[in-house]
Image (cartoon, rainbow, N blue to C red):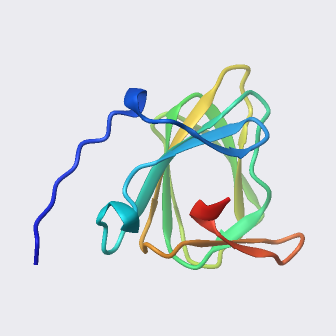
Amino acid sequence: MAKISQVFKIKEMNPVDRGPGLRGWPLMTEERGSKHLTTGITEFQPGANLALHFHNCEEQVTILEGDATAIIDGVSHQLTAPDTTFISQGLPHRFINTSNKPMKILWVYTTTQVTRTFVETGKTEDYLKR
């Protein structure tokens, strides 16, 4: 088995549009050699949020900058850097930037084949293909 290491310099990467007020930087992906993890950073502009959704795997989110409201399984949590969440597979959740400055999160998934299913529509998408 080949051994690899990589260094990601966010300032040298082009961000990906993740929706209104959201941009992201996928870091570790299957395309970059990962066998078990998908990781990245998403920046939320003030007031930006993700719709209520769930994933096909476990997820860890750490607030890197700013303040957020995390709604996990119907319970609202006020978070600030470096608060961290763990969300089980299939558990509905969303993050909302509740501050007047950008908020950044680091996300980690336990598979390279991440899907996101939106609770309101039931639509499932490949997380990194948005």
On the question of residue 106 being in view, the answer is no
Is 124 drawn above or below residue 71 in the view shown?
A: below
- Percent position of residue 68, x then y: 66, 38
Q: Quadrant of the N terminus?
A: bottom left
Is 1 drawn above or below residue 13 in the view shown?
A: below
On the question of residue 18 being in view, the answer is yes
Tell me where residue 82 sits by quadrant.
top left
Q: Is residue 64 left or right of residue 20?
A: left
The residue drawn where x is 75% and y is 35% is: 21
The residue drawn where x is 22% and y is 49% is: 6
Q: Is residue 49 left or right of residue 13?
A: right
Residue lying at the far top in this picture: please name it.
100
Tell me where residue 123 sits by quadrant.
bottom right
- Percent position of residue 112, x then y: 43, 72
Query: Between residues 92 and 108, which one lies in front from this camera angle?
Result: 108
Query: Between residues 87 and 11, which one lies in front from this camera angle?
Result: 11
Q: Quadrant of the C terminus?
A: bottom right
Is 41 drawn above or below residue 64 in the view shown?
A: below
- Percent position of residue 19, x then y: 75, 46
Query: Between residues 108 and 91, which one lies in front from this camera angle?
Result: 108
- Percent position of residue 83, x then y: 49, 42
Is 48 drawn above or below residue 33 in the view shown?
A: above
Q: Is residue 30 left or right of residue 101?
A: left
The residue drawn where x is 82% and y is 72% is: 119
Residue lying at the far right in this picture: please name it.
121
